[in-house]
């Protein structure tokens, strides 16, 4: 973990406890596991609104699939011993498996078995959402021990008309300009790839609700890909008109170095904020390439014609950490420190977005600081020389054409360290901080 980010033991514990509560649920694109997950998140965020889109609804080039229900599944060996049982781990069954009750020999069974030779003790996560199929997943080491003979495959499931569920929480600010935070709730028992995103997003929303707000914040909990497409089809004109920045949150629970996946062209406000914050608190972060590394809902938010400013910041990025999409992605991989450090990082993102106004000095020439009590003692308890340098540099670059984020980058200090200095200068009538893009401009 990057030690520039502090940890909050109680918050980290609470987030890990929430992940532990959600872990056993059998989430998929649709069905009772998703609804149970959203119901728990709604208990954490009472304002969360749960929505439903019927099966068969077109969403751009996609169609909402039928709802999947699974009650039990078991593969039994020739001697009667149980090879795998859905009750023991919900990754043992291929997601969206159709019902099956058949006996077949090992050769005929093999195409319906899935394992990872490179991770011989892991159960892989396999799905077949849009083509009818069935199968079992098991550790490769176990698969290699299977003996010839007749096996009984039983999957008690059904695909039926139902709905796709998602949820959103809108936290209004003084402005209708919005920050979009998106995360997904469609994977079964995997902790980093699945649960770290909703858990960190939940606690980020709780924090936002406690802050004075200029911007409006929209938190979305959706099934990956089809859920974001459905959400965009319902809300695209509003989002294109209102969203100024945002992030897709996933894979943020381990203690790996941070990875930054930019927007399609990498030039949005979200990109600027991500690079600034990561450069200050996690300088060892890795910048990924949108062409080769995109793999989550940033694909949909950045699609041509949609073009929302949504970046993705992870710890160990999807597809690249060994435990990804396997049973090894469990609650030991996700830690309290990993979760709390990621939460702190996202809080810094939102802090920068919230306070990034245009800065302009209100006097010609350098102001006389001494008669205002600003020189040489800028504040109590700080490093006077460093703070005075920041104050003087802030005034030197506050030309009314530069936003606070660009100014912070120019003078090479964290934006959030400038905020108390801005407050002091504004109270003294020496500085103005404005937000001309807001529909209801505010001053700090």
Image: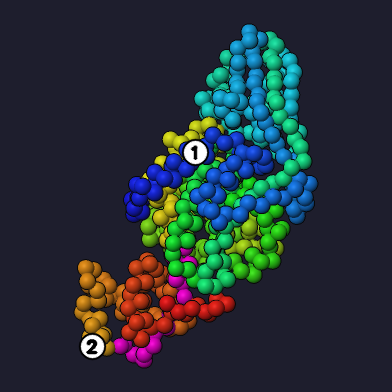
Residue for point 35% across, 50% down: 8
Tell me if residue 191 comes above or below residue 134 in the rendering: below
Left or right, residue 97 beside residue 342:
right
Residue annotated with mark 1: 21
N-terminal-most mark, 2 or 1: 1
Q: Nearer the viewer, residue 235 or 43?
A: 43
- CA gap between label 2 and label 1 equals 59 Å
Question: Callout 1: few (<14), some (14-19), or many (20+) C-alpha neighbours within 10 Å?
Answer: few
Residue for point 50% across, 32% down: 328
Question: Callout 2: few (<14), some (14-19), or many (20+) C-alpha neighbours within 10 Å?
Answer: few
Please tell me in which quadrant of the rendered image residue 276 appears.
bottom left
Residue range of the region highlighted in magenta in the rendering: 349-367
Q: Nearer the viewer, residue 13 or 305?
A: 13
Outermost residue to the top: 79
Please tell me in which quadrant of the rendered image residue 239 appears.
bottom right
Residue 363: in magenta span: yes
- Label 2 sits on a secondary structure element that is helix
Q: How is the image coloured?
A: rainbow
Residue 435, percent across and down? Answer: 50, 77
Residue for point 70% across, 11% down: 150
Residue 396: in magenta span: no
Residue for point 61% across, 69% down: 242
Tell me if residue 273 comes above or below residue 104 in the rendering: below
Outermost residue to the bottom: 364
Q: Which mark is residue 371?
A: 2
Left or right, residue 144 beside residue 361:
right
* Mark in front: 2 vs 1: 1
For the question of whether residue 188 can be seen, the reply is yes
Q: Nearer the viewer, residue 299 or 240?
A: 240
Q: Which mark is residue 34?
A: none
Quarter of the picture containing the C terminus is bottom left
- Label 1 sits on a secondary structure element that is helix
């Amino acid at each position: 973990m990057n030690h520039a980010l502090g940890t909050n033991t109680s918050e980290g514990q609470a987030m890990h406890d929430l992940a532990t509560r959600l872990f056993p649920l059998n989430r998929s694109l649709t069905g009772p596991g998703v609804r149970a997950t959203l119901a728990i998140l709604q208990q954490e965020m009472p304002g969360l609104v749960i929505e439903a889109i019927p099966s068969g609804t077109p969403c751009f080039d996609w169609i909402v699939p039928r709802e999947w229900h699974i009650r039990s599944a078991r593969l039994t060996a020739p001697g009667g011993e149980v090879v795998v049982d859905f009750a023991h781990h919900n990754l043992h069954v291929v997601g969206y498996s159709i019902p099956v009750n058949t006996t077949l020999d090992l050769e005929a069974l093999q195409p319906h078995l899935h394992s990872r030779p490179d991770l011989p003790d892991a159960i892989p996560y396999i799905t077949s959402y849009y083509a009818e199929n069935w199968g079992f997943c098991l550790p490769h080491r176990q698969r290699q021990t299977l003996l010839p003979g007749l096996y009984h495959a039983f999957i008690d499931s059904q695909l039926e008309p139902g709905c796709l569920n998602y949820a959103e929480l809108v936290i209004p600010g003084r402005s209708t300009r919005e920050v979009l935070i998106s995360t997904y709730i469609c994977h079964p028992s995997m902790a980093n790839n699945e649960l770290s995103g909703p858990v960190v997003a939940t606690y980020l929303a709780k924090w936002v609700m406690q802050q004075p707000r200029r911007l409006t914040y929209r938190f979305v909990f959706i099934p990956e890909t089809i859920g974001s497409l459905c959400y965009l089809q319902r809300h695209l004109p509003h989002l294109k008109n209102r969203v100024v920045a945002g992030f897709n949150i996933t894979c943020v629970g381990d203690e790996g170095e941070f990875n930054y996946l930019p927007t399609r062209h990498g030039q949005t406000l979200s990109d600027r904020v991500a690079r600034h914050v990561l450069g200050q608190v996690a300088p060892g972060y890795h910048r990924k390439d949108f062409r080769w590394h995109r793999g989550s809902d940033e694909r949909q938010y950045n699609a041509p014609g949609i073009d929302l400013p949504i970046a993705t910041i992870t710890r160990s990025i999807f597809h690249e950490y060994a435990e990804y999409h396997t049973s090894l992605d469990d609650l030991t991989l996700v830690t309290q420190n990993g979760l709390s450090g990621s939460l702190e990082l996202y809080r810094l993102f939102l802090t920068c977005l919230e306070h990034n106004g245009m800065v302009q000095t209100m006097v010609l020439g350098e102001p006389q600081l001494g008669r205002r009590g600003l020189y040489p003692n800028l504040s109590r308890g700080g490093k006077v020389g460093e703070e005075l340098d920041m104050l003087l540099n802030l005034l030197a670059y506050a030309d009314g054409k530069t936003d606070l984020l660009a100014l912070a980058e120019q003078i090479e200090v964290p934006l959030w360290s400038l905020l108390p200095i801005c407050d002091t200068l504004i109270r003294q009538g020496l500085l103005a901080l404005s937000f001309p893009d807001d529909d209801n401009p505010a001053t700090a």
